[in-house]
Amino acid sequence: MLYKCADEWRDAPEKRILLFGMSGLGKTHVSDMLRATGKWFHYSVDYRIGTRYMGEAISDNLKREAMKSPLLRELLMTDSVRIRSNITFGNLTPLSAYLGKPGDPDRGGVPWEEYLRRQKLHRDAERAAMLDTGHFAGRAAEIYGYPHFVCDTSGSICEVVTPENPQDPILTALGDQVLMIWIEGSDHHADELSRRFDKAPKPMSFTDDFLEEIWNAYLAEAGDTPETVDPDAFVRWAYAKALAHRQPRYRAMAENWGVTVSADAIAAVDTEDDMIDLVAEALG
């Protein structure tokens, strides 16, 4: 690990951390708080994915939809309007909307093969964005003079790495550049995340093998065909499977490549000093 003990972490003039875990457990909250001190550069992996690596695909999809409207088609063809996404650290909806949910097109679903294509595009983009971490850490110090760096990862980071492989290229690169910190949720947090997800189901990213497994299981259980699946019903059903699928992968990442802090402890972090103390305790 980048820091071998609590004292080494506390004494480091340049502190570099990476937060990972399920979405909704505090990664972005802590990253925003640290950025607000003026001393930490906040690198958002999702923002990088949605701008640098998938920005063109997202914009093209918006234009494809706009071309269905005669008025917008004419304006686009005469270069009279511009259509693009407006992704921010706090609003990643254009990226989620592009990923989509598989199922009935009349209910906003994406055909299965197209859904798989977009999933692969996202995984490739996430791998590239993760490997950009070191570049941005160096850039933050060299150009802007930030002494510290926090990488705010996507919840799907565990889908693009192999935690048990000591030669995993992404984790090997990250281990030399940042301290990886797992925000571990409890059963209570899992129930709360599921409750929130039921209210507003969102697209997620998975490996093809896992997707095929849960897709076929859902079709068998619901008695649907790929063309009749209710997209929201499927992703709600899949979310609990995702929690169970990702938990051991996160745990292996923490055990082999980083440290663990609890989601409750993260929720109590209000200041930079709080976060420094929490990480020191994890290293100790």
Image: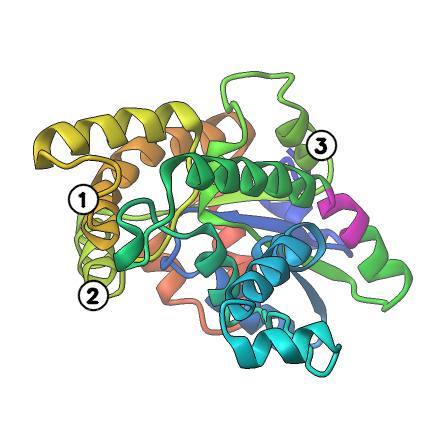
For disc 2, the marked residue is 199
Element marked by disc 3: helix
Real-space Cα distance between discs 1 and 2?
13 Å
In the rendered structure, find residue 237 and report the number of the disc placed on it: 1
Q: For the residue carrying disc 2, how many other residues have a C-alpha within 10 Å: few (<14), some (14-19), or many (20+)?
A: few
Identify the residue at horizontal 43%, vertical 34% (top origin): 113
Range covered by the magenta-colored residues:
132-137
Element marked by disc 1: helix
- What amino acid does circle 2 point to? Lys
Identify the residue at horizontal 51%, vertical 49% (top origin): 154
| Residue 4, quarter of the rendered image | top right
Q: Are marks 3 and 1 in contact (CB under 8 Å)?
A: no
Earlier along the polypeptide chain: callout 3 or callout 1?
A: 3
Instruction: Name the one closer to the observer, 94 or 17.
Output: 94
For disc 3, the marked residue is 173
On the image, the x and y values in percent for residue 136 come to 77, 53
